[in-house]
C-alpha cells in the first residue's frame, strides 16, 4: 500500500506539500496540487483517517443511536441520516438501543470513546445521566424524534397533534364513540405526548377516555397484542383502537384476528407511524404518517451546524392522517386520502434549549419550521 512518502516522491514535492493538498490548504500552487492529485490517483493512495483525526481533532464521523432498528420508522430514519451525512462528507456509526436504556448508554459510551464529531440520539427513556453529562460537557448533540426535557439540545421531531385531532374527528364521523389507545412508554416524550393529544382530541368531541381504554404498551408488537386482548375482554370493548406506533398496531391486528374478529366490521384499528406494509394488510390500515426522511436529513444538518459552532434551532414537521379502510371507511377507488394536518409549514422555530411547545386544547398548534431538503 502506498504511503504519503511515496506520493511525495512521485509528485516531486515534500511530504508537507502532499499533506497541505490533502487537507485543501490554499497555499499550494496549482501545478503542485495537480501533480500531487495525479500521484494520489496513480498510486491508489488512501489517507489514514485515524492519523488525520489526531491532527485535525475531527474524525468526520457521526454517531446515531436509535430506539429500535426493527421498527420500520427507525430503519427509514437511519437511512435518511446516513444519506445526508454522506452528502456532507461524514460517515455514520449506528447503535440499536432496542428500547433499552442500558443498551442505549452502552452505545453512547462506545461512540464517545471512538471520538465521533457529533451524536444523534432518539432516547429510549426520559432520563440518561450519560447523555446529560455528554451534552453538558460540550459534545455536539441533536435529539431526533424523542428528547430529554431540560437539556440544552436541539430537537428535530414531528408534531402529530393536529393529525391525531384529524384521526379522532374521522373516527367520530364514522360513528365510533368508544375509542381506546395503546400507549407507548410514559417515560418517553412520544409516548406521553400521543396519549395527551388523543385525550384532548376526544374531549373536543365531548368524549371521555376511561382508564380502562388506556393500555400501556412499549412500542413493541407483543405489547400491542397483550393490550388489545385486555380491551377485548372488557364487558364493553372499544369500538376503535388507536395504536401509538406501527409495531403495536400489528400486534393489535394479531390479537383481533386470533379472536376470530374482523377489522373493521367488529372493531376499528388505526396507527401512529405509517409503514409500507399497511397498504398490504387486509384491510389496509388507516395511519398517521410522519415525514421521516425530512426528519433524518434535518437532524444531520442541525448536528453538522452544531459541530461547526453554530446554534441550530429545534424544528417540528407536521404529521398527516392517511385514510384507508381499517376504520369502516367506505370503499373508494384511487390512492388513500391524505388529510392535511392544518399545521402551517413555515413559521419561526422554537428555542434551541427546548423542544417545540405543545398546545393546550384551547390553543392553536405550536409554531412549526419545515427545513428544505
Image: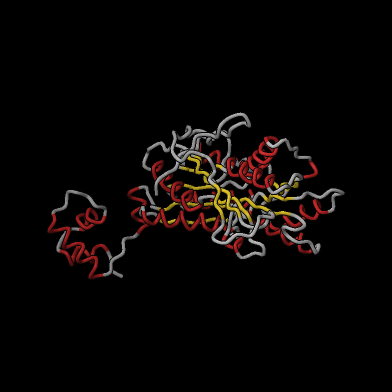
Name the residue nearer the viewer: 133 or 331. 331
| Most distant residue in the top direction | 362
Q: Residue at x 53, y 40 (%)?
A: 342
Q: Is residue 184 visible?
A: no
**What percent of the width, then of the height, locates residue 139?**
46, 42
Q: Nearer the viewer, residue 77 or 195?
A: 195
Q: Tell me where residue 214 sits by quadrant.
A: top right
Seen in the image, is 153 located left or right of residue 41? right
Q: Position of residue 16 (x, y in %)?
A: 21, 54
* Pick the front one: 26 or 258: 258
Task: Look at the picture and state if 154 lies above or below 92.
Answer: above
- Left/right placement of residue 156 relative to residue 285 reads left
Horizontal side, residue 150 vs residue 35: left or right = right
In percent of width and height, residue 123 lies at: 58, 46
Q: Where is 266 relative to 138, above or below? A: below
Above/below status of 42 relative to 287: below
Q: Position of residue 114 (x, y in %)?
A: 47, 53
- Is 203 drawn above or below residue 143 in the view shown? above
Amino acid at each position: 500500500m502506498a504511503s504519503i512518502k511515496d506520493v511525495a516522491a512521485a509528485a516531486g514535492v515534500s511530504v508537507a506539500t502532499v499533506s497541505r493538498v490533502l487537507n485543501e490548504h490554499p497555499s499550494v500552487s496549482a501545478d503542485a496540487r495537480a501533480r500531487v492529485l495525479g500521484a494520489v490517483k496513480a498510486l491508489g493512495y488512501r489517507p489514514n483517517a485515524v492519523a488525520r483525526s489526531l491532527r485535525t481533532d475531527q474524525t468526520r464521523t457521526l454517531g446515531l443511536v436509535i430506539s429500535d432498528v426493527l421498527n420500520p420508522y427507525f430503519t427509514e430514519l437511519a437511512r435518511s441520516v446516513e444519506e445526508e451525512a454522506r452528502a456532507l462528507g461524514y460517515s455514520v456509526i449506528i447503535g440499536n438501543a432496542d428500547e433499552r436504556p442500558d443498551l442505549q448508554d452502552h452505545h453512547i459510551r462506545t461512540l464517545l470513546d471512538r471520538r465521533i464529531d457529533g451524536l444523534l440520539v432518539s432516547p429510549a427513556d426520559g432520563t440518561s445521566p450519560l447523555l446529560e453529562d455528554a451534552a453538558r460537557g460540550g459534545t455536539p448533540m441533536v435529539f431526533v424524534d424523542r428528547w430529554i426535557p431540560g437539556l440544552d439540545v436541539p430537537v428535530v421531531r414531528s408534531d402529530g397533534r393536529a393529525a391525531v385531532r384529524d384521526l379522532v374527528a374521522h373516527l367520530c364521523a364514522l360513528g365510533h364513540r368508544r375509542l381506546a389507545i395503546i400507549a407507548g412508554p410514559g417515560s418517553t416524550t412520544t409516548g406521553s405526548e400521543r396519549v395527551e393529544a388523543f385525550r384532548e382530541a376526544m374531549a373536543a368531541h365531548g368524549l371521555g377516555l376511561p382508564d380502562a381504554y388506556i393500555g400501556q404498551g412499549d412500542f413493541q408488537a407483543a405489547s400491542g397484542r397483550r393490550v388489545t386482548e385486555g380491551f377485548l375482554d372488557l364487558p364493553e370493548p372499544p369500538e376503535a383502537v388507536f395504536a401509538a406506533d406501527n409495531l403495536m398496531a400489528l400486534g393489535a391486528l394479531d390479537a383481533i384476528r386470533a379472536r376470530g374478529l374482523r377489522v373493521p366490521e367488529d372493531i376499528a384499528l388505526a396507527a401512529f407511524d405509517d409503514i409500507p406494509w399497511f397498504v398490504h394488510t387486509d384491510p389496509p390500515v388507516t395511519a398517521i404518517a410522519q415525514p421521516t426522511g425530512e426528519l433524518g436529513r434535518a437532524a444531520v444538518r442541525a448536528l453538522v451546524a452544531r459541530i461547526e459552532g453554530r446554534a441550530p434551532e429545534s424544528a417540528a414537521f407536521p404529521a398527516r392522517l392517511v385514510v384507508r379502510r381499517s376504520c369502516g371507511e367506505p370503499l373508494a377507488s384511487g390512492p388513500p386520502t391524505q388529510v392535511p394536518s392544518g399545521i402551517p409549514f413555515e413559521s419561526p422555530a422554537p428555542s434551541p434549549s427546548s423542544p417545540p411547545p405543545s398546545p393546550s386544547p384551547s390553543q392553536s398548534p405550536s409554531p412549526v419550521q419545515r427545513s428544505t431538503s
